[in-house]
Amino acid sequence: MDLIVTSLERRPAILLNTATGGGHWLTLFLVGRKANRDSIGARITVTTPAGRALHEWVSQSVGFLSSSDPRVHIGLGTETRAASIEVRWPGGGTITLKDGAADQFLT
């Protein structure tokens, strides 16, 4: 992923990813039905076949007058799939998806 970093009264810094590693990933776009449609506050746990647990949450605000991508990007490294993807919704409830292939966008 590439990044753009901003600071007050300064020019933005653009950081381009030029790595050639080619690691695997999953990107999740959550759509809520109870608490909020943007799923802000949802907690995500991705478990890999090797037993690693990767944790993320949905948050769009990261600073003053700014926002970030509403999707959640999970880096899997050399692993080619997720053994399970668990989503804990901010309005209550949990869903678990089994065996998610890497390198895809999921809604």
Image (spheres, helix red, strand yellow):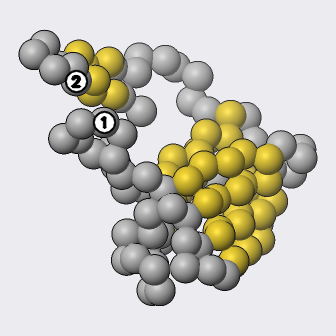
Position of residue 102 measured from the top left corner of the image (x, y, whole percent): 63, 53
2 and 56: which is toward the camera: 56
Report the residue at 60% width, 49% height from top.
Answer: 56
34 and 51: which is toward the camera: 34
* 57 left or right, relative to 34: right
Viewer can see residue 64: yes
Report the residue at 32% width, 18% height from top.
Answer: 15
19 and 75: which is toward the camera: 75
Quadrant showing the N terminus: top left
Mark 1: which secondary structure?
loop
Position of residue 98 measured from the top left corner of the image (x, y, whole percent): 77, 71
Position of residue 107 measured from the top left corner of the image (x, y, whole percent): 47, 71
Mark 2: which secondary structure?
loop
Viewer can see residue 101: no
The vertical placement of 11 against 49, above or below, is above
Q: Which residue is mark 1?
A: 63
Mark 2 burial class by Cα count in 10 Å: few <14, some 14-19, many 20+ = few
Report the residue at 45% width, 86% height from top.
Answer: 33
Q: Which residue is mark 2?
A: 6
Proximity of marks 1 and 2: CB atoms separated by less than 8 Å:
yes
Mark 1 burial class by Cα count in 10 Å: few <14, some 14-19, many 20+ = few
